[in-house]
Amino acid sequence: MNQRAARILIVEDTASLAQTYAALLEDAGHTVDVVATGAAAHDRIARALEPYDAVLLDLQLPDCDGLEWLGASGDLAQNSSVIVATANGSINRAISAMRLGAYDFLVKPVAPERLLTTTRNAVERHLLAQEVKVVSALAGREHFQGFIGKSNVMQAVYRAIENVADSKATIFITGESGTGKEVAAEAIHRAGKRAPRNFIAINCGAIPENLLESEVFGHVKGAFTGAVEHRLGAAREADGGTLFLDEICEMELKLQVKLLRFLQTGMIQRVGSSRPEPVDVRIVCATNRNPVVEVAAGRFREDLFYRLSVIPLELPPLRDRGQDIALIAQTFLARFATEEGKVFDPLNGATIAALQARTWPGNVRELQNVIRRAVVMNPGPVLAAEHVALAPEASLRPKDAGAPPPDTDTDTDNVHLEGSATPSRTLAEIERMAIEQAIIVADGSIPGAAKMLAVSPSTIYRLRERWKIDDKQPSD
């Protein structure tokens, strides 16, 4: 380990010795503070912004016994390497000090080479101990900025978020539905310098195409029918903070051009306005699709993709997170039990095994729904394996899986419609019935229904807007 300049505190009441020690250590490149009493040492340590790398402690102090002082100094020996200085007749006391956590001892008079060697070793030991603490803390984190999980893949995600938090570069988060892409975006915002300002999230698949530009860039009063007042837009509201564009691959190509121009210039132009306005936002976007496939299919601009994907961040599916499944489930169990006013025992081995046997195509969101349903439907205190097994999986097939078996009639795999194939119904009526039934099966979730029907959520939102208009038209 390369030796670096260390911060050292000398606690010595003999001025000549203190000055000699300080001169030797400063000549070696270290920063040295000197105090003459135990009280002064306590005060200096308490006011220090960081622990000293090493403390050189005399055992004979004018206001206290050095051994007693060390014993009363709490975790000093854990935060700094303590070296005690003792006279020849006090070796036993020096050994007692080492039992209290001191690193080493020096016998007065102290030879210069001995002082420098012992201090160098003590500093290296301190630095190594600090590195071990950091690595252990990183490896053992079970919670991080809204995430739950201690698996290796999630530790890598945590480190990536910390590394990119203060960067100005755009970040493209990918991952299956329910893996926590918005949680990751918020974590990036909270961990960085922009945390005091706004975090604004826009779901590009949940807003009709004709309104998305206004939602992102804003509009002026009278810009279009229904624009009865000025609207700032998400980009302006996020000024100084972070703008999160979820399901970015759902954005229509015309708006992609305007987003690209915004990224290049840092200027927005509200709908109906001719005046560009500068904004300072950090862009984070996400999709549950494969953006490379979307680019190849012509649904997403290649230049915009490379502009957004400066720093890619992929979130792992729940099935690849091992024991995190049990940890997350237990956290949800405690939370929902409290909300419902019930008491549940910790999850037992059989229940955990049942949870880990599932493929979790809906990932953490699906697990959350399964545990919530089980808590609501059972009195407790035991959540048995059959309680979680009874909850149907929201989607039994990954997106890229093949077509379902012909005989499959599970509601969550295929939307079954009574009489949907009868000749008396038009294609538009069958389409509407299929979509409305899928929304019911998905518990009202438009993205969930879209996933079952293999269409984009924006398609469903657009059709529903059209149905509202049609329903209001007078019949002939």
Image: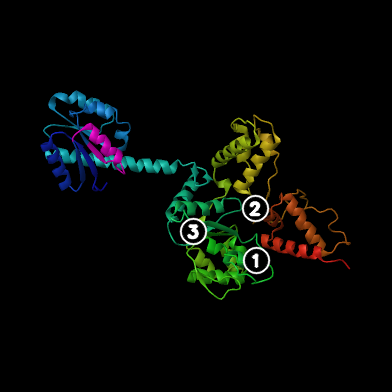
Task: Say which element carries label 3.
Answer: loop
Labels 1 and 2: the sequence-earlier one: 1
Which labelled disc corresponds to residue 70? Answer: none
Q: CA distance from mark 1 to mark 2?
A: 31 Å
> 65 above or below 284?
above
Relative placement, left or right, of 145 versus 205 is: left
What amino acid does circle 2 point to?
Pro
Labels 3 and 2: the sequence-earlier one: 3
Question: Is residue 456 among what the camera can see?
Answer: no
Name the residue tied to disc 1: 211
* Region of the chain picked out in magenta, as a range: 36-55
> 226 above or below 154?
below
Task: Say which element carries label 2.
Answer: loop
What amino acid does circle 3 point to?
Gly
Question: Is residue 34 among what the camera can see?
Answer: yes
Name the residue tied to disc 3: 241
Which labelled disc corresponds to residue 398? Answer: 2
